[in-house]
Structure formats: C-alpha cells, structure tokens
Image: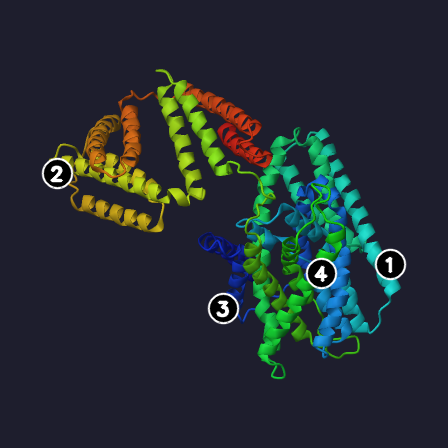
Amino acid sequence: MDLLMIILLLLFSLLLSNIVSHYIPSIPAALIQIAIGIILALVFAGNPFELETEWFLLLFVAPLLYNDGRHYPREELWKMRVPILSNAIILVILTTIMGGCFVHWLIPDIPLAAAFALTAILSPTDPVAVNGIARRIRIPEKVLSLVKGESLINDASGLVAFNYAVAAVITSYFSIHAAILDFSYKFLVGAISGFINGFLITWLRFTLRKQGIVDVTFHSLLQILTPFVIYIITEEFLHASGIIGVVVAGIVHALVRERTETLIAEEQVLTEHIWSIVLFILNGVVFLLLGLNIPSSMTEAVADPSINNWMLVGYVCIIGLVILGIRLGWSYIFFYHYHFDKAGNGAKSDFKTYLMISLTGVRGAVTMAGVLSIPYFLASGTTFPQRSLILFIAAGVILFTLVAATIFLPILSTGKSAKDEAVNKTDTSAAKRKIILEAINRIHAEMNDENKSVVYELMDEYKTMIKRIQREADLDDTDDCQHEIKAIRLLALKKEREYINGMMERHEISEAVFDIVEKFLDRREEALSTSASSGLLYLIGRITRNWNRYKGYSGRDDRKSESAKLRLSKNIHLKALQSAYHFLEEYEKKHERANLVHVVIMDYKRMIDRLKTPAERHNGKAEEQKEEMHIKVMDIERSEIRRMFESGEITREQAKELRRFVNNIESVTLYEYME
C-alpha cells in the first residue's frame, strides 16, 4: 500500500509540475520537479525514500537511453562519432582525474580515491533538463546533438569509473591494468550483447507475425519491454554494461524500423503513442526522485558542527565551476582542431558556442543515484571518509549546473536559431492554420443542397480546431484582438439571453422549451470561458440561472412531445440569434474597431443560415457523406503541405510535423472501436 501511495503521489506531483511550468515557462520543468520533490521530502520527513541505484538504472535509465538510441539520427551519429566518443570517454576520464585532484587539494579531508569517485559520478550529463530549456530558447542544433549523443555513452563510462574509485577506497587497492581490461570488457561485451539481443528480439517479432500473431497491442508491449530484458541479460548474466547494451539495441531497432515501418504502420503509431506516455512519466519522475533525495543527502553535512554551512556552499560553487571549466577547456582545445561542423560549411565555432557546450553539461539523476550507492563502511570496518560531505557536494553541483544553464544559456543564445539561423519560415502553428483554412475554402466550394448540413458541420469542426491552435500558439501581437472579439461574442450572447428571458416573462414559451434554449446558450458561453476568471464567472452565472428557474418552476406537466419541443426551441433560438444579429449591426456602426464586430456578425450569419436549413435525419448516408468529405479534405491538406514545402514556405521538419498533424486527424476519422 505504501508503494502504491508513493507512485500515485509522484504521478500527481508530475501533473502539478507541468501545470506550474505552463504558467512559469521561464523555469525549466526539471527544476520545478526538483523543487516539488524537495517539498515532498520535507513534508514527509518521517518517511524517507531510498533510491536504489540498480533499480533506478533498470527502471529509468535503460528505457530512456533505449528510446534515445532508436531516435538518434543515424547519419548524425556517424558524422559526430569522434566528438561524441571523445566527450563520452576521454572527457569523463579527464573530469575524473583533474577534478579529483582539485577536490583533494581543496578539501584535504577527502582522500584522493574518494575525490576521484565524486568527480567520476559528476561526469555524466543529463540532456533531459537541457531539452526543457531548449524548448523556449534558441540553442544551436549541433550543440544539442552533441549533448544528446554523448549522454548515450557517458552514463556508462562515468558509472564504471565511479565504481572503480569507490572500490579503491573500500579495499585500498587499485590496478590500472585490471581497470582498463574490465572497462574494455564492459563496453565491448555490452555493445555486442545489445546488437545480438536487439537483432534476436526483432527476429522474434518477425517470426511471430509469420505465425499469425499480428496483434498490434502485443507487439507494442514487446517493444516497450525490450530495454528491460536486454539490460537484465547484459548486466546480470554477462556482467557487462547494460546501458551500452540498450543504446546499441535502440540503434539496431531504428535500422530495422526504417526498412519495415510502412508494413507495420498501425503498430508503429500505437507504440509511439505508448512510448510518449512512458517517457513523459519517466522523465518527470526522475527529477521528482532527485528532489526527494536531495534533503536527505544534505542533512548530515549541514548538521555537522565541524563544517561551516557557508563553506559548504562555497565548496559546491567552486567545484561546480571547475567541472564546467574542464568541459569548457576540453571543448575549446578539441573542437578548435576538430570542429564538429567541419562536415558542413567548415566554419570554426566561436567561443560563445564553447560556453554553450560547457553549460549544456547539466548533471542529473544518474549522478544522484550513483552517489547514494556509496557504502557507509570500508572493508576494514571504518566509516567511508567524508561520505556526508561527498553527498552534499554532489547534490549541490547538480543544482548548480541546472541553475547555471537556466540563467546563462538564454543569454548566450540571443540571436541564434534552433536550426542555426534558419531562414524566416512560416511557423508551424501558422502553417497548420493555413492548411485548415485552405481546406475550409475547398469544402465551401463543394457545398450543394444535398450535403449542406454535413459541410456546415465539418466547417464548424475545423474552425474549432483553428481556435485551439490559435490558443496554443504565441499570439502576443493579436492578444488584444482575441480578447476584444471574445468580449463582443459575450455581449451578443447576453442579448440572446435577454430575448429568451423576455419571452419567458411574457409567458410566450414553456419552461421546457426555455430550458432547451438555455442549454444551447450555456454550452456556447462555456466554450468562450477559456480563462480561469471567465470560467468562474460562467459557473456562478449558471448556478444563479438554475436556481432562479428552480424557484420559479410551476410544476405543470408539459405534454408536448420531445420532437415538438425541439422544433419550437429551434425557432426560438433562431429568433434570439436574429435579435443579437440586429444588435451587432447597430453596434458595428459605433464601435471603434468595426472589423472585429464584423467577424462576430459573420459567425452569427452562419449560425442563422444553418438553423434555417432543414435538418436532415441522422442516417447512414449523412455519416458516409461526412467521412468522404473528411478524406477529401485531408487530401487537400496534404497537397497544400507539399505546395508550401516546394515553394520554400516551410522547412522539411515542419512539413513532417504537418503531415503527422493530418495523419492524427485521419486516424481519428477512420478509427473504429473493436473489442
């Protein structure tokens, strides 16, 4: 029960962190999740949560790195193989040795081997936090590719170096020859295991399909379980690096998928949807767990009277700067001679790029999980030297690198684009609106007496979609217009209510008909109440109206049939719309921004035309017409996407995103539920 409550608490906290992140976009979601984790740890101080390193690597690191491996571009991985391997192996060794020597010099109470253990576990980078920052600023694509590529491997190299350093502290023995051999074994055997097991699982899936087991849910689950199986086999049975194994398996999966994805499209769509949920949960919970463990890792050092707390903070800042400084120096020296854009235009990177490479080296949950595995006692029975201080420094450096990236990356990224100064292209949201508007125009052109109601219904759906896209996009320059239009709509809605309330007071309509029309108006007002304040006002108004109706209810039995009530309510609703329409025409003449009022007038004209059109019976023919029209519209949208790409209005990546957008609509349109 305790475990279930912890899981539910983490999931609710994850949802809360994303809500907070929506309203405070300047702070990365990872930092907010760490903060919530720290708050939870303080609130539930009597119930400590221990993070087991092996479990953490299996449940979180393995699936995350497997997914990164299967999505990392193969050409990019090959083109950047030298920088990625250099950062993932050589930089980790340099950070461990140079950083360890500095830590031992700065804090002599920490033995050299223990200092090596600290800097080794501080060497792996965490790209998840950087991705959160990259969504709101412009980080060069080559920098992001480098940090994502090196993170595929440096978790393994950092953990191997850390384990050797800890073993040296515990046993007081270290053999460089044995370390190199074991290091090579873990990497090579891990890679071979990943390749063979990835290939075998792919072969198993292929064989099962040939045997008639083609259930897409079964095969999707098999793909999700793949990284866990490969990690366990590689770690437990071969005693090699399970991390390297899952990364290689992910790359193998990507190579196979490129050749077969068109044959198993439904499975791929379902699997990607499941992966998106799994990754959302794992990425968020990782930082919540990090926050949960930070207070416990710092408490003992803070409570130690022999160490000044301000000195502890100073140690964290100095060591954090040194770790980032080593990364900066390596980037400058290595990339000055082997700059990773030489395969492109050949221009050397400037110093600002080296700073960005350094700052993107944010430390994360792997560091926390590793450092918490440091034992309390040595082989001799004495306590591990300065364990509490090492834990405090590790937790502090994680926060230091994350805060430094949050503050300084936006400053350094000014003037750069996410795709290295991509040309002035139509943004994706604007392109979505454009293809939908083109579809609406083509739908309207094909309207006739037979399909009129279906066309109007479809146009309503697409206009609602445009409004949703509009809300999601950054519309700083049109916010005033949107608020003004919404205010005009609410004013017109108020006039409709006044009209039907007047009819009710004059006893020209029954209570049953009044209720039907009132529900129509409630639904429209609810759709307009997009903000928290307007939503609250809508709810208060609705409660008040329902209470007034309840008090004034006569209790008479309205014996009219339901169809008669609906016909009468439709006529009353039409008259209410016409009343508001005439009001808007007069309002337009005296309003400063008549063009905005005209937008609302056109909407009312469309609603009036729809109500005047005789309603078709809900039958199979209407549904078939709508489905055929949907398919025709999607063909129009795809043609428009191709035209926009060929004319240079959108990039290749934007074209892919727009096609995915259309494909999602198509999957919903054609979806049929089956048990």
Q: Residue at x 75, y 46 (%)?
A: 248
Identify the amino acid type marked 2: Glu
Q: Amino acid at mark 1?
A: Leu
Q: Between disc 1 and disc 2, whose residue precedes?
A: 1
- Quick check: 123 above or below 513? below
Q: Secondary structure at mark 2?
A: helix
Mark 4: which amino acid? Gly
The quadrant of the rendering that contains the N terminus is bottom right
**For mark 3, what is the residue?**
43
* Image spot of residue 256 (x, y percent): 72, 35
Label 4, label 2: how many angstroms apart (C-alpha)?
81 Å
**According to the image, label 1 marks what residue?**
181
Residue 113 x, y percent position in the rendering: 77, 72
**Residue closest to the far right:** 177
* Circle 3: element type: helix
Give the class, few, some or many, for how many residues have Cα within 10 Å of label 2's Cα (few <14, many ≥20): few
